[in-house]
Image (spheres, coloured by chain):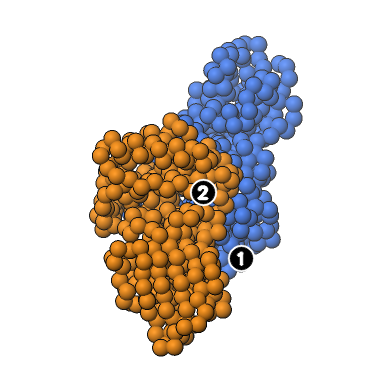
Chain colours: A orange, B blue
Amino acid sequence: MGQSVTAFAPATVANVSCGFDILGFAIDRLGDKVSVSFNQEGILRVTGIEGDEGKLPLEPEKNTCSVAIQAMLNKLGSKQGIDIFLEKGLPLGSGMGSSAASAAAALEAANVLLGNPFTKEELVPFAMESERIACGSAHADNVAPSILGGFVLIRDYDPLDMVKLPVPEGIFCTLVHPHIELKTSDSRSVLRKQISLKESVMQSGNIAGFIAALYKSDLALLSRSLKDVIAEPSRALLIPGFYELRDAIKSIGSLGSGISGSGPTIFVLSPNGDIAHEAGEKAKEVFQKIGLGVDVYVSEVNKRGAFIVSR
Amino acid sequence: MGQSVTAFAPATVANVSCGFDILGFAIDRLGDKVSVSFNQEGILRVTGIEGDEGKLPLEPEKNTCSVAIQAMLNKLGSKQGIDIFLEKGLPLGSGMGSSAASAAAALEAANVLLGNPFTKEELVPFAMESERIACGSAHADNVAPSILGGFVLIRDYDPLDMVKLPVPEGIFCTLVHPHIELKTSDSRSVLRKQISLKESVMQSGNIAGFIAALYKSDLALLSRSLKDVIAEPSRALLIPGFYELRDAIKSIGSLGSGISGSGPTIFVLSPNGDIAHEAGEKAKEVFQKIGLGVDVYVSEVNKRGAFIVSR
């Protein structure tokens, strides 16, 4: 075994309210670590996983890390053997982009191991292949911010068109993860297939306002724009405490809240760390009242995405 | 009769493709002029209209200029008598914001006549009252850019939430007005009331990309984002030559096209004046082939909105 490279990739929030299906952003500190090294056997393999309570597959064709790196090797036409070791820092199936963080960290590490053949942007399609395995669709709204950092718009998939957006100074996120299980398939099945023209226009207006707010650093506009009339009305019903928390954080000066990914995690955006922590306390109160355990993470919005920890 | 104040307000493009119902922008030079002066009779009246071929009403409760100024006077609690004279520079019912330009010019002039009691932003709700009379709904996506200039996002109406957006340097518009009559009511009736979730997500992605493109001055992104999957597929069928023109202007480097307002005017955005003029020539060719007369206007995107011509 030769040189080892270790990368970290952050948790992400996708389906950012009015940015349903097109917008994601990255969190600081919370995330997954992946170490990669060459092996002499000429095979791609997952040598171990920590922190997943034995739930994640080691088979290279099912593991998000190896699927992502395989896509990269295919692009290079390489049959290089690589060992992969994954340290999960993220809870599975929480709506925090757990599978995306693993793939992003794996790609960041493997890219360095292989001598940086790709830009960060070029890594995104490889990570999308692993999302296809993990989630059933090759979506980019978690993997792109996990790799690139900040807010990332996925304008289109055919071809992939990403726009990295500015992050207003001081903006913090509180992630609230209630201890309930919510299957992505259930969260998907409640979505309406048809929506009214009026709702679509409202959603357009809000995402347009949100994007302008990021460029203007206009947090009042950002707050007014943080509304999802498409997915949230259906999905929030699957998350007890969602509306109680939304109301509770309004009174303390938070900018707004929404469902992270397909839930059950709820994200709250705040203009600074103090309010973000206070939002976390409000969340604990709300979920204690309804008798549900909850994990709370407070973090700045991450601007740098995946990065190398050691090599 | 005392002091007279004359203002000009520009033509505008509303329903800017992916910005259906939420985005408008202003044109240079082409527009309406309104002169106002105090009268001693204590009544609000339209003393004359030029350039409308006798089609516009003089009755104060039906004329867009007087309706707008009446809304302003009501807000002030004033019973001041004002004479209004309108010079139409815009064709009626063309989809170029003709009624909006009249109201905007009237308000700009009256505001100065009355000693500037209102900011430009505060004039918009008065102009919306005249749109209610002229178009049946108090929409702001023509009046706001006609008053404020540039690209204006109408994020919401309850309450009115407008965002003035940056105008990329050098961007030009070609307005193509085919000589067909298209009633707003017909143009409205073809709109679908329900759309698919997928279409709504596409529209959101495109308007988000368009807004980002304005802030980044990224004309390639602007061009990729200039797609309307909501209204255009239905409305374009009512405008002969629409798709032929769209294809013709792509080959010369224009950024894209769309239906202005509810049509029949088509707008083409171009990265500079030369290409905008060439787009105009292409338009003449296209409409000559299908045997339709056409008026073509080429203009920069206007950044200043309504302004005082003389006082």
Instruction: Please tell me how crowded label 2 is: few (under 14), some (14-19), or many (20+) other residues with Cα within 10 Å.
Output: many
Local secondary structure at mark 2: strand
Q: Residue A69: x percent and y percent?
A: 43, 76
Q: Residue at x 45, y 55 (%)?
A: A30
Q: Residue at x 41, y 88 (%)?
A: A41
Front residue (pair B307, B152): B152
- Seen in the picture, residue B173 relative to A45 is either above or below; the reply is above
Q: Amino acid at mark 1?
A: Gly
Q: Quadrant of residue B50?
A: top right
Q: CA distance from mark 2 to mark 1?
A: 42 Å
The quarter of the rendered structure image containing the N terminus of chain B is top right
Residue position for label 2:
A300
- Seen in the picture, residue B45 relative to A170 is either above or below; the reply is above
Residue position for label 1:
B253
Front residue (pair B207, A28): A28
Q: Residue A262: x percent and y percent?
A: 33, 53
Q: Residue at x 64, y 21 (%)?
A: B117
Front residue (pair A6, B186): A6
- Seen in the picture, residue A74 relative to A273 is either above or below; the reply is below
Q: Residue at x 26, y 56 (%)?
A: A183
Q: Quadrant of residue B254?
A: bottom right
- Tag 2, which chain? A
Local secondary structure at mark 1: loop
Give left or right: position of B171 versus A204: right
Q: Amino acid at mark 2?
A: Glu
- Tag 1, which chain? B
